[in-house]
Image: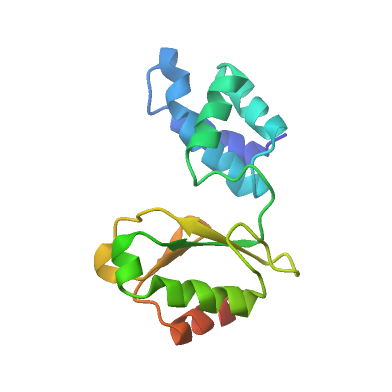
Amino acid sequence: MLSQESLNKIEYELTKYPVENRQAAVMAALRIAQMEKGWLSKETISYVADYLRIPAIAALEVASFFNMYELEPVGKYKISVCTNISCMLRDAEVIVEHLKQRLDIKDFNETSADGKFTLKEGECMGCCGGAPLFHINNTKMHEYLTPEKVDEILAGLD
């Protein structure tokens, strides 16, 4: 179900914990699986749980609690816009509306018709000084956004 490369990464994560605490690597293992698959199906979550030798429900609880895990397919680029107070005070709603228009979608959790972009609402991303901001695919953060800067960022994505 997962490539040998992903399993090797999970094995590396397991080295960070005592052998009897394999469950401690569940967040990292789910992240690795999601990076490979693009999202976490119930089958993938069960596979990760089996690999870690934990109950499937324990892995599902983690995957469904944290918003960095996707339980449904998303676009190639998942754009998570911070909408908490610091970003809102610095016009995050302008960025959200611009993205909706550019991606031709109506609301959060929608994917563009070409399947390339999914727009998500994000919780505080811990960089209030750089507001407004967004993450792309939970990895690359862009701060001090303006509609023009958003257009440049989108143009740079293949």
Colouring used for the render: rainbow
- The picture quadrant where one finds residue 154 is bottom right
**Residue extending farthest top:** 20
- Asked if one can make out residue 88 in the rendered structure from this viewpoint, the answer is yes
Query: Is residue 71 rendered to the left or right of residue 133?
Result: right
- Image quadrant holding the N terminus, namely top right
- The picture quadrant where one finds residue 112 is bottom right
Query: Is residue 75 rendered to the left or right of residue 155?
Result: right
Query: Is residue 139 rendered to the left or right of residue 8?
Result: left
**Residue 29 drawn at (x, y percent):** 53, 34
- The picture quadrant where one finds residue 52 is top right
Between 156 and 100, the one nearer to me in the picture = 100
**Residue 111 drawn at (x, y percent):** 68, 62
Name which residue lies at 35% across and 54% down.
Answer: 124
**Residue extending farthest right:** 114
Name which residue lies at 49% across and 29% down.
Answer: 26
Is 96 above or below relative to 53? below
Is 21 above or below relative to 12? above
Query: Is residue 74 rendered to the left or right of residue 82?
Result: right
Name which residue lies at 63% across and 42% down.
Answer: 71
- Asked if one can make out residue 12 in the rendered structure from this viewpoint, the answer is no
User: So how many labels did they put on this image?
Assistant: 0
- Image quadrant holding the C terminus, namely bottom right
Between 52 and 104, the one nearer to me in the picture = 104
**Residue 32 drawn at (x, y percent):** 55, 41
Between 9 and 86, the one nearer to me in the picture = 86
**Residue extending farthest left:** 129
Name which residue lies at 60% across and 34% down.
Answer: 7
**Residue 81 drawn at (x, y percent):** 46, 63
